Image: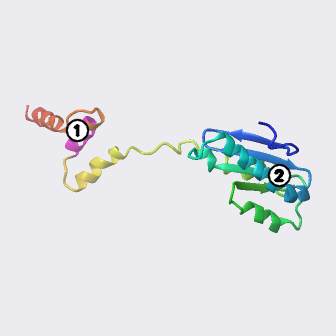
Amino acid sequence: MNAVSDGDPGRLFEDPYSVVCLVIYDTWGDLIDQWPRAQDSFVDIISNYWRRGEPKTWDGYLVLITTDEARDRYEQGDRIRYDTTRARKLVASGEDIRAISDIERLLSPLLPLEMTPGANQHPDVMLLLPPVLAAAGVDEDVVRTLIDAFRNDEPLLEAIHALRDDANS
């Protein structure tokens, strides 16, 4: 499925979660005049290839790009962009795309989230418990014993009894 329909220079992309149709126009006027036909074709493809309940049926993106400069066309571009009745639309013109980073910004709703190094490394909350509970009068050794037993999927009461037996011997 390379072309959206005869005459439309569209490309379809999909991942497990969404479907994206990328259409590039020579001029801003072409984009304004022809995007409804590209959207109709895109929606037809989604309807024909994915069942109604699948996430892809409601998570379709129509990416409309022209290298032509928009100048006085921002209002028209916004009207297209905010018309989400049949598909979400990402719209960019030559003024919006000057560098590779601009493409990344345009496509950011479609790209995976980048995790900064260490972002998914959370402190071990269990290690915060002993001093907090000690301040409330709970013995830190008992709390650590319970945490160890919990992590090792061992019976908690048996761990406490073993701790007391060790303390009494």
Which secondary structure lies at badge 2? strand
Of the image marks 2 and 1, the number of the one nearer the N terminus: 2
Quadrant housing residue 81: bottom right
- At a point 90% along the width and 55% down the height, the residue shown is 30
Q: Main SS type for the magenta part? A: helix
Q: Amino acid at mark 1?
A: Thr
- Identify the magenta region: 140-149
Q: What numbered label is drawn on residue 65?
A: 2
Q: Secondary structure at mark 1?
A: helix
Q: Which mark is residue 145?
A: 1
Circle number at residue 80? none
Q: Is residue 165 left or right of residue 30?
A: left
Q: Is residue 118 magenta?
A: no
Q: Is residue 130 left or right of residue 165?
A: right
Task: Residue at 88%, 52% (x, y): give it.
Answer: 67
Q: In screen coordinates, is 83 left or right of 17?
A: right
Q: Residue at x 28, y 50 (%)?
A: 131
Residue 3 picture location, percent across and down: 82, 40
